[in-house]
């Protein structure tokens, strides 16, 4: 199980971030496998969510120093709004500083107000995303690469540092205006939202078909879910925005059902939590997380650990 920052429940778009480092360290001690930060450069009041507010790379730099083993991920970097050289430099730096704990979730971008502010064309974001990802891969995975791209040219120079394990896993968020086959061929995993169970099962089955036999190895499928864990452990699930308000007994059953259809990691967003998140983390640590230890083989016999690079 992973957690999406900020680890607090809050109304409106902007969190308080009170005690945020303490909550993250608590989650690591509790046994959360991963921690995810978001890339929200501008506040759009109509969108209603500013993420963790801090720049993701600055924040990950601090988190790499204040945690020891939890995987650090982005969910997700908006590739078209950043030059791929900047993204590559930042990603490799965090990977090095954290001892190889970075996972890079990437996205095309879904907040239209951001693109004109950066001088970017909203309509061209899908193509720029593909160009950015190709550039990113080349400069991180090759020494003194020769790059000829619409986004820039490189010859006779190199980007440092390089990743700890030579390659930073890249996971696509949503569809990003891309064909699913392209996502399967060009990324290392898929981060998706929380549709109904049968629809998610069909998504995963399609993903397995497209990635089965891939020489690059197993490619995980992760689900992001908003969670309001109720004080009543027997409360039945009630739908909320992109997630559920539910007691821990039913939540445990839901997690088992999600595991059965092939979800490799659940990423929890606590924004709608009505209880103190510190209290919720303790309850999950005692009653839920022990049933889903990191690195446990999945329901279909596959060893599902691509999103846990630290061996936790």
Image: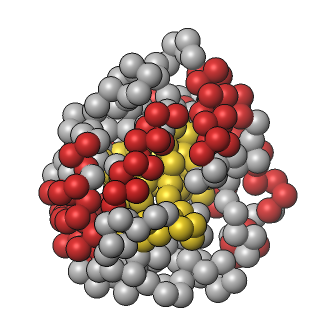
Q: Quadrant of residue 268?
A: bottom left
Residue depicted at x 49% and y 28%: 219
* Residue 119 % position (x, y): 74, 69
> What sort of colour scheme is used for the picture?
secondary structure
Q: Nearer the viewer, residue 303 or 173?
A: 303
The C terminus - image quarter: top left
- Tell me the residue at 41%/76% (across/down): 273
Q: Residue at x 53, y 63 (%)?
A: 243
Left or right, 248 with respect to 87, comes to left
Total numbered badges shown on the rendered structure: 0
User: Extreme right residue here?
Assistant: 123
Q: Position of residue 177 (x, y in %)?
A: 76, 47
235, 158: nearer the viewer: 235
Residue 134 shows in this picture: no
Q: Nearer the viewer, residue 298 or 18?
A: 298
Q: Report the side of 71 relative to 81 (left or right).
A: left
Observer-nearest of 272 and 154: 272
Q: Residue at coordinates 39% horizontally, 81% vertically from top-left? A: 274
On screen, residue 109 above or below 8: above
Residue 274, placed above or below residue 283: below
Q: Point out residue 260 in the picture as x, y percentages from the top left corner.
A: 46, 34
Picture quadrant where residue 60 is located? bottom left
Residue 312 visible to an observer of this rendering: yes
- What percent of the width, then of the height, locates residue 85? 53, 48
Is the residue 162 above or below the residue 217 in the image?
below
């Amino acid at each position: 199980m992973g957690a999406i920052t900020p680890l607090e429940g809050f109304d409106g778009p902007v969190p308080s971030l009170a005690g945020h480092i303490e909550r993250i360290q608590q989650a690591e001690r509790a046994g959360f496998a991963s921690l995810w930060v978001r890339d929200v450069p501008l506040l759009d009041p109509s969108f209603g969510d500013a993420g963790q507010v801090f720049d993701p790379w600055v924040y990950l730099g601090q988190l790499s120093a204040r945690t020891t083993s939890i995987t650090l991920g982005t969910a997700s970097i908006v590739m078209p709004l950043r030059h791929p050289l900047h993204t590559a430099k930042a990603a490799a730096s965090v990977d090095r500083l954290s001892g190889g704990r970075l996972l890079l979730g990437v996205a095309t971008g879904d907040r239209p107000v951001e693109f004109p502010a950066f001088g970017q064309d909203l309509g061209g974001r899908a193509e720029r995303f593909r160009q950015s990802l190709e550039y990113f891969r080349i400069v991180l995975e090759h020494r003194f690469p020769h790059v000829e791209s619409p986004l820039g040219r490189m010859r006779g120079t190199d980007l440092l540092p390089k990743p700890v394990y030579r390659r930073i896993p890249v996971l696509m968020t949503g569809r990003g205006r891309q064909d699913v086959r392209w996502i399967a061929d060009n990324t290392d995993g898929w981060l998706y939202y929380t549709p109904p169970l049968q629809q998610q099962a069909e998504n995963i089955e399609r993903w397995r078909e497209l990635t089965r036999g891939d020489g690059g190895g197993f490619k995980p499928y992760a689900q992001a879910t908003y969670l309001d864990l109720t004080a009543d452990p027997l409360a039945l699930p009630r739908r909320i925005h992109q997630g559920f308000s539910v007691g821990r007994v039913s939540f445990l059953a839901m997690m088992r059902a999600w595991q059965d259809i092939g979800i490799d990691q659940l990423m929890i967003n606590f924004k709608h939590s009505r209880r103190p998140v510190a209290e919720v983390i303790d309850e999950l640590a005692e009653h839920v997380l022990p049933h889903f230890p990191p690195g446990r083989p999945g329901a279909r016999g596959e060893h599902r650990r691509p999103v846990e690079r630290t061996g936790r």
